[in-house]
Amino acid sequence: MRKLTAMIVASTLALSSASFAFAAETTAAPATDATTAPHGKMMHHKGPHHMNPFAGLNLTEQQKTQMKDIMKDSGARPDRAAMKAQMDQMHSLVASDSFDESKVKSQIDTITKAQSDRMLERARAENKMYNLLTPEQKKQFNENYQKRSAKMEQMRDHKPGEANTTTAQ
C-alpha cells in the first residue's frame, strides 16, 4: 500500500510540474555548461533540461512561441491544493485504526482519475508540439528519448552499494 501511495504521489507531482516547467524552459536561453546555474539556484546533476523533452532541438523563435501557446491552451495548472487534499485524505485512511477497503479504493480511483486526466492532457499537448518540429528535429527528439530511456533503465537497475563495473575495470 505504501508503494502504491508513494508511486501515485511521485508520478502526480512529476507529471504536473514537468509539463509546466518545460514551457518556461523552451523559451529560456540554454546554459553554456550543464553544471552552471544562475546564482542562488540549485542545479540538479541531470542538467538544466532533464525534464524537457524538447530541449536541445534548436527550436526557432516561432516554434518556441507556438509551444508556449500550446502549453497555455492545454488547461489550467494542476490544483496543488486539491492534490494535497487527496493525498491527505489517503494518509488519513492509511493512518486509521481500522482499514476501510472501500474508502481506500474510492480514494485511489479519485487520485488516479485526476492523474490520468493530467497525463492525457500533457500527451495531447506534447503531440501538438512534436508535430511543430522539422523532420531533423523529430529525429533528434526520438534519439534523445532513447538516450533518456536507456539512462533511466540503467539508473533503475543500479543497486545502491554496488561498485560500478564499467569504471572499476
Image: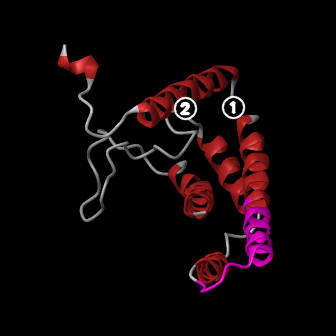
Position of residue 49 measured from the top left corner of the image (x, y, whole percent): 45, 44
Q: Is mark 2 in CB contact (under 8 Å) with mark 1?
A: yes
Comparing 119 with 49, the one in front is: 119
- Quadrant of res 10: bottom right
Q: Secondary structure at mark 2?
A: loop
Identity of the residue drawn at 55% across and 63% down: 2
Q: Residue 78: image x %, image y %?
A: 67, 70
Q: In this rendered view, identify the residue nearer to me: 20 or 57.
A: 20
User: Measured along the vertical axis of the image, is residue 59 above or below residue 7?
Assistant: above
For label 2, the residue is 57
Q: Main secondary structure of the magenta part?
A: helix
**Can you say which quadrant of the picture contains the C terminus?**
top left
Q: CA distance from mark 2 to mark 1?
A: 9 Å
Q: Is residue 113 magenta?
A: yes
Left or right: 23 as drawn, with respect to 111: left
- 30 or 19, nearer to the observer: 19
Image quadrant where residue 30 sits: top left
Residue 103 at x, y percent in the picture = 77, 78
Q: Quadrant of the N terminus?
A: bottom right
Based on the picture, tell me whether residue 21 belongs to the magenta stretch.
no
Quadrant for residue 82, please give it. Answer: bottom right
Q: Which residues are magenta?
A: 96-115
In this image, 51 relative to 125: left or right? Answer: left
Q: Amino acid at mark 1?
A: Leu
Q: Is residue 69 above or below residue 111?
A: above
The residue carrying mark 1 is 133
Q: Amino acid at mark 2?
A: Leu
Residue at image position (23%, 28%) is 163
Q: Residue 99: which numbered mark, if any? A: none
